[in-house]
């Protein structure tokens, strides 16, 4: 990856004993060194890679395998299914009851409500629930106008998992190598179940701990990760009519509570048994994928001048697109505040 804060938070809080064995390597490191040390590799943030970054990642895989055919390589960049292909495969294989399409195909939708997502991030829905084709077309146009590429916008059919008490649950579990690790159960009253709106009390904490201890969906989780060709990442899912429904798999998940999320000391204590159990399981899984390969040996990776030029151009384009979206968003916010209420 280029940003490593997601895993750095874990190492600082739970994984201090792993710092001698686990190193974070960015594509800038690879380009500057023109090589990588021998060892077990986990490729993360696959959906965030530019075309050239993915090409370099594949070169790393090929070079490492040439040196040691038995080396551990997790999440081969050319094999992992990204969000659209993965969720489409889940629907086609009847593992999900809801469908997904590219925004350019919005006229094909017959069943509503739906919502918009960006294929390339993990920030949740871009829109409220949309109940008509007119609302959908306006939402697509609005987001394209604010800097999103049409190809990156996805239309997702809403899958309602609320229970009779008005509660939504988002389950999260990791895979590390061959191990399935239940992580959390997030409770909320909003269909977009995020950390900031999370409900935490003694009952939800007991349910979460039981989930981490019992691993009730292990077989389904393993099959789903296999479908995605992912052996490191976190899956988020819900339960509808007793059947799991996949929301997404993140191959570079945040390992600690997001910045700006407030938790009382009592809430932290309630969740601590589940957090500590997951951290212990996660560390054991990381240790299990370690190898005896000698990290002092360097495997040569030749990054050409043309690749370097493309890499620089892709990053400039990404920065421009992000800056444009931020500027338009800020302008739109000022405009809305000036409108009469």
Image (spheres, helix red, strand yellow):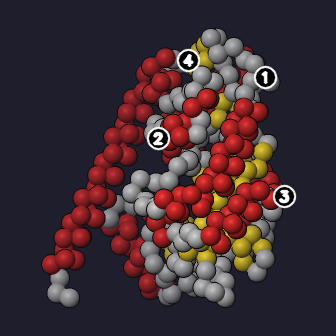
Q: Quadrant of residue 220?
A: bottom right
User: Which label's residue is closer to the chain start, 4 or 2?
Assistant: 2
Q: Residue at x 38, y 73 (%)?
A: 141
- Check disc 4 and report its element: helix, strand or loop: strand
Residue 69, numbered circle: 1
Task: Answer with left or right where residue 237 lies relative to residue 321.
Answer: right
Q: Residue 115, labelled with which disc?
A: none
Do we see residue 47 in this rendering? no
Asked which quadrant contains residue 293, the reply is top right
Q: Residue 5 placed where, x, y %?
A: 46, 41
Q: Which numbered mark, 1 or 2, is in the foreground of this view?
A: 2
- Residue at image coords 47%, 24%: 29
Q: Position of residue 165 (x, y in %)?
A: 63, 87
Q: Residues within 10 Å of mark 2 (few under 14, many from 20)?
A: some
Q: Measuring 69% from the left and 66% from the top, which residue is drawn there?
A: 206
Q: Nearer the viewer, mark 3 or mark 1?
A: 3
The crowding category of the residue bearing disc 3, from other C-alpha atoms within 10 Å (few below 14, some 14 to 19, many at least 20), is few
- In the picture as drawn, the residue positioned furthest to the top comes out as 297
Q: CA distance from mark 3 to mark 2?
A: 31 Å
Which residue was labeled with disc 3?
Answer: 219
Disc 3 element: helix
First in sequence: mark 3 or mark 2?
Answer: 2
């Amino acid at each position: 990856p280029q940003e490593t804060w997601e895993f750095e938070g874990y190492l600082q809080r739970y994984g201090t004993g792993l710092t001698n064995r686990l190193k974070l390597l960015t594509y800038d490191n690879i380009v500057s060194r023109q090589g990588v040390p021998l060892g077990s590799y986990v490729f993360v943030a696959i959906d965030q890679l530019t075309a050239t970054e993915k090409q370099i990642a594949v070169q790393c895989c090929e070079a490492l395998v040439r040196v040691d055919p038995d080396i551990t390589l997790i999440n081969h960049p050319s094999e992992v299914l990204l969000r659209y292909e993965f969720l489409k495969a889940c629907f086609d294989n009847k593992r999900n009851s809801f469908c997904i399409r590219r925004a350019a195909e919005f006229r094909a939708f017959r069943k509503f409500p739906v919502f918009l997502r960006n294929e390339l991030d993990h920030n949740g829905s871009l829109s409220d629930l949309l109940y008509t084709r007119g609302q959908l077309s306006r939402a697509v146009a609005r987001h394209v106008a604010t800097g999103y590429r049409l190809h990156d916008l996805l239309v997702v059919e809403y899958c309602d998992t609320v229970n009779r008490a008005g509660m939504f649950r988002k389950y999260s579990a990791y895979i590390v190598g061959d191990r399935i690790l239940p992580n959390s159960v997030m409770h909320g009253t909003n269909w977009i179940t995020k950390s900031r709106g999370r409900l935490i009390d003694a009952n939800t904490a007991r349910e979460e701990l039981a989930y981490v201890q019992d691993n009730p969906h292990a077989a389904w989780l393993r099959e789903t990760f296999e479908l995605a060709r992912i052996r490191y990442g976190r899956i988020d899912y819900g339960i509808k009519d007793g059947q799991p429904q996949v929301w997404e798999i993140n191959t570079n998940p945040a390992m600690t509570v997001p910045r700006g999320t407030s938790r009382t000391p009592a809430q932290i204590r309630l969740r601590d048994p589940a957090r500590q159990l997951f951290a212990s399981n996660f560390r054991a899984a990381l240790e299990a994928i370690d190898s005896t390969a000698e990290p002092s040996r360097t495997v040569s990776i030749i990054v050409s001048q043309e690749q370097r030029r493309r890499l620089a151009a892709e990053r400039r384009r990404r920065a421009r697109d992000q800056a444009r979206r931020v500027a338009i968003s800020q302008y739109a916010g000022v405009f809305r505040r000036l409108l009469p209420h």
